Amino acid sequence: MKLVCSIAAVLVNTSKGVHGSVAARRISAEMFKELKTKVLRLLPPTSNGPTVHRDETDGAEILSCTVKALKEGHIVAVPTDTIYGLACLAQNSDAVRKTYDTKGRNGQKPLAICVGEIQDIYKYCKVKVKKELLGDLLPGPVTLVFERSEELNTDLNPFTSLVGVRIPDHPFMRQLCQMCGEPLALTSANISSHTSTVEVHEFQELWPKLAVVVDGGPIGDQSRLGSTVVDLSVLGKYSIIRPGCALSSTVDVLERKYGLSELSGEE
């Protein structure tokens, strides 16, 4: 699928930088000289961040570069339909550990997985709802939590039998998952407990730890709420884990269309 946006790629040598004046950006760019993070721009660059030289490329090359980095066990930053995320191959235990280390995340907090198509969910999750329900919510700004299947890496969230799964409504992310041929582990692109990010310069302090940063421009929503997380692991029930940015529409689908009832704390 051809991306309907102009696409350029940037090889950015990165470190912590400052924003504001042209002079500050020039200093920031000088600081980046020896590092090797690739920033691949899906949209024309904004005024934020250092001024750097960029070479035109196409969407296929951006996808190929990102897939290569993931297959080599690296961490990448990607745009989604809600906020920017950090991704690695979910089946790669070393990469999963590096993702936790990169953002200083508590090891007892789970990572979601991201897949490209609804049928992929059935390989990694034990689904107890109708396929039509999945189609009504996905792709979209929702994380659905199910019991995990035996196919999923046992080192991913070993402390729980559940796993959250996403299909972002973002063409690049869907193509990326399809090209990888396996699930991505996905978490927000920020230092743990810090504000979620909607532009790549907002997590610039993480760039030196990443192989690729895919810059899709500012995330349209700008709410920073992240996806709505709903547990569907109990037959006929749902439980909201995080309200997120799509709470009312999600609950409307679950209750009005499919007759699910909210799981009470006593059940």
Image (cartoon, rainbow, N blue to C red):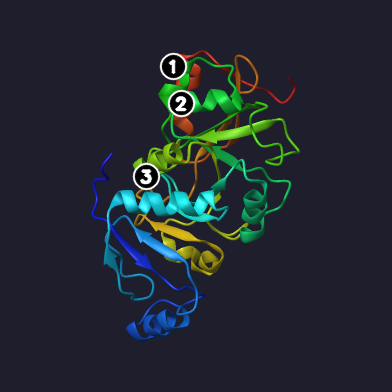
> Which label number is shown at residue 132?
1
Number of the front mark, 1 or 3 = 3
Tags 2 and 1 touching, CB below 8 Å: no
Left or right, 224 with respect to 74, comes to left
- Report how many numbered discs are placed on residues in the image: 3
Give the structural element (helix, strand or loop) at label 2: helix
Number of the front mark, 2 or 1 = 2
Residue indicated by mark 2: 118
Q: Earlier in the sequence, mark 2 or mark 1?
A: 2
On-image quarter of the N terminus: top left
Query: Which residue lies at the image location 59% right of the left edge and 61% below the top edge?
Result: 191
**Front-most of 49 and 4?**
4
Left or right, 83 with respect to 92, comes to left
* Residue type for callout 3: Phe
Q: Position of residue 181 (x, y in %)?
A: 48, 36
* Residue type for callout 2: Ile
Residue indicated by mark 3: 172
**Front-most of 70 and 45?**
70
On-image quarter of the C terminus: top right
How far apart are the alpha carbons under marks 2 and 3? 16 Å
Q: Earlier in the sequence, mark 1 or mark 3?
A: 1
- Image: 1 above or below 15: above
How far apart are the alpha carbons under marks 2 and 1? 10 Å
Q: Earlier in the sequence, mark 2 or mark 3?
A: 2
* Residue type for callout 1: Glu
How many other residues sit within 10 Å of disc 1, few (<14), some (14-19) or many (≥20)? few
Q: Position of residue 10 (x, y in %)?
A: 35, 66
How far apart are the alpha carbons under marks 1 and 3? 24 Å
